[in-house]
Amino acid sequence: MARLDLLRTPYTGEEQARLESLRSRINVARAILDARLSAGLSQEEVGKAAGTKQSRVSEIEGMKGNPQLDTLDRIGRVLGLMVALVPVVGIEPALPELESWVVDSRSVVVLTAGGVGEHMLDFPMGRING
Amino acid sequence: MIRQGRVRGSWRLVPYIAPSGRSQVLDFLDSLRLKDFPRFVQVREVLMPEIENRGPFLIGPPIWEGLGAGFYEIRSARVRLYCSVMDPRLVMMYRGVVKRWPRFREEDRRICQRARKDAESDAYDQEKREYLYRGICKKRGQAGPS
């Protein structure tokens, strides 16, 4: 049976814009789900270890709701992850005075690490700060 | 549920296409794309890659649930994608619904059984069905898959 791309029709321009607005949620959902499955843990076990409910873990993996940073942090730590904001090439800052900082930040090297794969970011702080 | 170990690899998610060239599951995903884009994105960008990379049995509930008689569902909120596992490492998706009832409805089960019988027959050729599906997309004026 041939490999098909019927499930991956390209996003339209309008959809791309909507997708970008969901990008953080997608990244968080992927990171939590991937780390949880790699650890062989259920949502309930992660929730319990993080002092929250299974439904919170489910919401985050399901890109639903608006999880509190604290909750996200606790769930992440259970799975060996931490919440971080990283400068990303292609996202232009809304404030012009940040432009030079962002240009500098483009030299940031984002590395992938084993286990969590592309979602786990390791970057040299010195280079971010110039 | 198998919870130990990790088999990264080559599972494939394939939409079932009827002999007429129609695909309920692809039509359903298209409609989900229009009606609930974030849910569609979660299915496509989070769940599907995970199932393909890891295989469904390492994912388990609540995302991957058994329904009995060899049928399974991929779950995202109230969205259900009914499927079965076929060799080798292939998940055939038969039907998508937004669930408003507690169980796997008899009507859905019958439709899935009929589709599975067709998909498991020697006459089923995914490439030919895809060709038919593209023809239908063209008639509808849709771009169809690239």
Image (spheres, grey):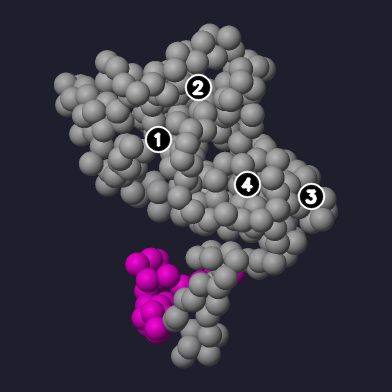
> Do the residues at discs 4 and 1 belong to one chain?
yes
- Looking at the image, which is closer to me, A17 or A40? A40
Residue beneath label 4, please? Answer: B58
Residue type indicated by callout 2 = Val
The alpha-carbon separation of the residues under discs 3 and 4 comes to 16 Å
Does B88 sit above or below residue A93? Answer: above
Q: Where's residue B136, x and y in %? A: 21, 22
Mark 2, mark 4: which one is toward the viewer?
4
Quadrant of the snapshot with the C terminus of chain B: top left
Name the mark on residue B14: 1
The alpha-carbon separation of the residues under discs 4 and 1 comes to 19 Å
> Do the residues at discs 3 and 4 belong to one chain?
no
Mark 2, mark 1: which one is toward the viewer?
1
Q: Of marks 2 and 1, which one's residue comes earlier in the chain?
A: 1
Residue beneath label 2, please? Answer: B97
The alpha-carbon separation of the residues under discs 3 and 1 comes to 32 Å
Does A88 sit above or below residue B135? Answer: below
Residue type indicated by callout 4 = Leu
Chain letter of the residue carrying label 3? A
Residue type indicated by callout 3 = Glu
- Per the image, label 1 sits on a secondary structure element best described as strand
Q: Of marks 4 and 1, which one's residue comes earlier in the chain?
A: 1
> Do the residues at discs 3 and 2 belong to one chain?
no
- Which range of residues does the magenta coloring cover? A84-107
Chain letter of the residue carrying label 2? B
Residue type indicated by callout 1 = Val
Chain letter of the residue carrying label 1? B
